Image (cartoon, grey):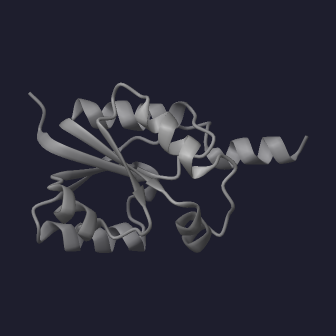
């Protein structure tokens, strides 16, 4: 039996790699129904100040094709309270590289009011979209 009924992961998922898969599979192990929010290109530009390489529609289709993902939604903001309330989410799953950041410290406080947990999983070391981007641009 899983700990949470509905879980949520939000990300860019640009240049899909093993770290993404590890996070999504671990999230699904901990909930009955996994919703994945794929960040819009505009949102990525707003908070990461980067252009995506893979178009939004393709990123969403890749995520939706995974057997561990039950539903995909397109995200236009990072408002975790709104998305949890709209989708009856009990837990948000994140890589532990985000733990302790000002944004997620604030989110933890806000989400506690709604009985929503943030669960951090170990970050997959040695691979990231940033590393892949740097390798592509250096060739």
Q: Residue placed at 55% from the left, 71% from the top?
A: 47
When the figure is inspected, residue 74 is found, relative to residue 125, above or below; the finding is below
When the figure is inspected, residue 42 is found, relative to residue 70, above or below; the finding is below
Question: In the rendered view, does 49 fall on the left or right side of 60?
Answer: right
Q: Residue furthest front?
A: 57
The image quadrant that residue 136 belongs to is top right
The front one of 111 and 13 is 13
Question: In the rendered view, does 14 fall on the left or right side of 121?
Answer: right
Residue 108 in the image, given as x and y percentages of width and height: 25, 67
When the figure is inspected, residue 38 is found, relative to residue 112, above or below; the finding is above
When the figure is inspected, residue 7 is found, relative to residue 99, above or below; the finding is above
The image quadrant that residue 6 belongs to is top left
Q: Residue placed at 32% from the left, 33% from the top?
A: 26
Question: In the rendered view, does 38 fall on the left or right side of 58?
Answer: left
The front one of 58 and 136 is 58
Question: In the rendered view, does 60 fall on the left or right side of 93?
Answer: right
Quarter of the figure that contains the N terminus: top left
The image quadrant that residue 23 belongs to is top left
Residue 116 in the image, given as x and y percentages of width and height: 16, 59
Quarter of the figure that contains the C terminus: top right
Residue 127 in the image, given as x and y percentages of width and height: 61, 37
């Amino acid at each position: 039996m899983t700990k949470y009924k509905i879980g949520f992961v939000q990300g860019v998922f640009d240049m899909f790699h093993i770290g993404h898969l590890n996070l999504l599979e671990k999230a699904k192990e901990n909930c009955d129904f996994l919703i994945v929010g794929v960040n819009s290109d505009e949102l990525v530009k707003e908070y990461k100040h980067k252009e995506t390489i893979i178009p939004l529609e393709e990123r969403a289709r890749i995520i939706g094709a995974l057997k561990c993902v039950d539903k995909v939604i397109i995200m236009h903001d990072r408002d975790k309270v709104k998305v949890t309330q709209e989708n009856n989410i009990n837990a948000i799953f994140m890589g532990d590289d985000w733990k302790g950041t000002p944004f997620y410290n604030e989110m933890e406080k806000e989400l506690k009011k709604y009985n929503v947990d943030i669960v951090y999983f170990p970050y997959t070391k040695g691979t990231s979209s940033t590393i892949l981007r740097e390798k592509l641009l250096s060739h």
